[in-house]
Every structure is written in C-alpha cells, then in structure tokens.
Image (tube, helix red, strand yellow):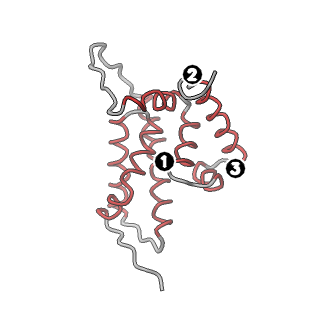
Amino acid sequence: MTRAIDTSTDAAIALYQSMVYGLALTRTRSPSDADDIFQEVFLAYHRRAPDFNEEEHRKAWLLNAVINCTKKHLSRKTRHEVPLPADLPVVELQAPEDTALYDALLRLPDKYRTVLHLYYFEQLSVDDISRRLKSRPGTVRMQMTRAREQLKEQLKGEYFDE
C-alpha cells in the first residue's frame, strides 16, 4: 500500500523551496529573477493542482517546471532588457568564503551551470538530467566535464595548486 502524498501547495513549498529556488538561481544568476521563477513555478503548481502517486514524480514535475520557466523568463528578459543605473548599490554575499566558488560557478555558461546544479545539488543521474534537458546522456557528461575543467581553471590558486 502506497502512502498518500500531501499535494497541497504549502506541502510542496515546504519540501521543495530550496530545490526550486536553487535551480532558478543557478540558471538565471539573479536572486530577483530566481524569486520570480519561484513564484511562477508554485503558482502553476497551485493552479494545476497536479495529483502525484509518488514523491519522485512531484520532484520531477517541479524540476521540469523550473527549467521551462527559466527558459521563458530568460527569453522574455533578453527581448525587454533595460540597463541598470550605474550608481546601483552592490549587494555583498553573506558568506565571503564562498564568494570565489560562487562567482566562478556564475561565470559558467548556462548549460554548464544547469547540469552541475542538477547533478550535485539535486542528485539527479546523468540519464535523468538528459531527459529533463532533452539532450543525450553523452552531451550531459561532456558538459559536466567541460564545466569542471572551467571551474578548476578559474579557481587555480584558490582551491587547486597551480
């Protein structure tokens, strides 16, 4: 007998808020954009009220929703982008020791940031990532290899011996 899943929006947010926000932030590089996507994903969840038999199915639905929402959001943003004023204050990260790694991750191209996030933070397999991103497993593995190489190059002297 399978255990019933609480499919309420509140339950989904409680379980998956960090996953949804983290992936959105990884893909957009912007906390305010990640906030927008977070709201958009959970609003879609609330409106559609999907019924899931398994927790993994709900997690997969949310991951796909984040990926799709970020694609739409980024395409809209590039079409309607307005430059920010030069005197805008700079926001400092809370944990300065993570700044170099975080900055290096944000400098990676979107495709590399996304596969690393899904693999390391969401613990998805290469096959799962390839299905979500609609690409071949070999492509995902190559993107992960190139992403790691770029991170290592950027962090030489910081975390790795030169």
Secondary structure at numbered mark 2: loop
- Tell me the tag on residue 157: 2
Spatial CA distance of label 2 from label 3 is 32 Å
Query: Is residue 31 shown above or below 92?
Result: below
Residue 90 placement (x, y as % from top left) = 30, 21
Q: Amino acid at mark 3?
A: Pro
Q: What residue appears at the point 58 percent right and 36 percent down from the top-left corner? A: 112
The reply to whether dot 3 and dot 1 touch (C-beta < 8 Å) is no
Q: Nearer the viewer, residue 87 or 100?
A: 100
Spatial CA distance of label 3 from label 1 is 19 Å
Query: Is residue 114 shown above or below 43?
Result: above
Q: Does label 3 or label 1 sit earlier along the sequence?
A: 1
The residue sitting at the top extreme is 86
Q: Nearer the viewer, mark 2 or mark 3?
A: 2
Residue indicated by mark 3: 137
Secondary structure at numbered mark 3: helix
Residue 153 placement (x, y as % from top left) = 62, 25
Residue indicated by mark 1: 68
Residue density around tag 1, few if under 14, some if 14–19, many if 20 or more, within 10 Å: some
Residue density around tag 3, few if under 14, some if 14–19, many if 20 or more, within 10 Å: some
The part of the image, by quadrant, that contains residue 34 is top left
The part of the image, by quadrant, that contains residue 32 is top left
Judge left or right: residue 104 versus residue 24.
right
Residue density around tag 2, few if under 14, some if 14–19, many if 20 or more, within 10 Å: few
Spatial CA distance of label 1 from label 2 is 37 Å
Q: What residue appears at the point 37 percent right and 63 percent down from the top-left corner? A: 48
Q: Amino acid at mark 2?
A: Gly
Q: Amino acid at mark 1?
A: Asn
